Amino acid sequence: MRVLFVCLGNICRSPTAEGVLRHKLRTAGLTGQVDVASAGTGDWHVGNPPDKRSQAAALRRGYDLSAQRAQQVTRADFSSYDLILAMDQSNLRNLKALQPAQGKAELDLFLRRYQSSVDDVPDPYYDGEHGFEQVLDLIEQACDLLVIELKGRL
Ligand code: 4NP
């Protein structure tokens, strides 16, 4: 089972989701059964580590994002991943435009799929400290439900 989180730059929201899900899978004893990755629809930050503010906020909650490097989503990802989760509706629109007619990946809006009260993980890039905490709050909640779904699908 392979899961890909996608945001715009792949330096704030989707790397956070990757780190949180990986941690929760480890706690659930599912490491090795689910492959987790993240990517951006844009290419500006390819090869860079996550934003220092995302890394610091994540580390305060026990998630180490330091080994991650940004990459851009590709059409081939729709064949190699089972589930592609967009962080906001703009990311979802861009992914739909890229999605090949064939390809096994199921494409969905991350928060909407996991019954959050909001649809979008807000882009924290131009925001203050609070934005990064809010991103973590939303991602942690949704990842708890994602882990339950994954358990049922394995
Ligand atoms: P992300 O945040 O999509 O959560 O990684 C952003 C990072 C960089 C930019 C925009 C959003 N940017 O414009 O460079």
Image: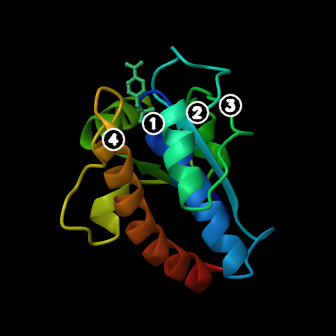
* Disc 3 residue type (three-letter): Arg
Where disc 4 sits, the SS reads helix
Q: Please identify the quadrant where the N terminus is shown.
A: bottom right
Where disc 1 sits, the SS reads loop
In the current view of this chain or complex, which residue is farthest to the bottom?
A: 152
Where disc 2 sits, the SS reads loop
Q: Which residue is mark 3?
A: 69
Alpha carbon separation for disc pair 2 and 1: 25 Å
**Is 145 displayed left or right of 79 in the figure?**
left
User: On the rendering, which quadrant does ligand 1 occupy?
Assistant: top left
Residue 50 falls in which quadrant of the image?
Answer: top right
Q: Which residue is mark 1?
A: 99
Q: Residue at x 31, y 49 (%)?
A: 121
The residue closer to the viewer here, 34 or 153, is 34
**Ligand 1 contact, mark 1 (Cβ < 8 Å):** no
Q: Residue at x 33, y 41 (%)?
A: 92
**Is 43 displayed left or right of 136 in the figure?**
right
Q: Which residue is mark 2?
A: 50
Along the polypeptide, which appears first: circle 4 or circle 3?
A: 3
Q: Residue at x 25, y 49 (%)?
A: 120
Mark 4 burial class by Cα count in 10 Å: few <14, some 14-19, many 20+: many
The residue closer to the viewer here, 113 or 15, is 15
Alpha carbon separation for disc pair 1 and 3: 23 Å
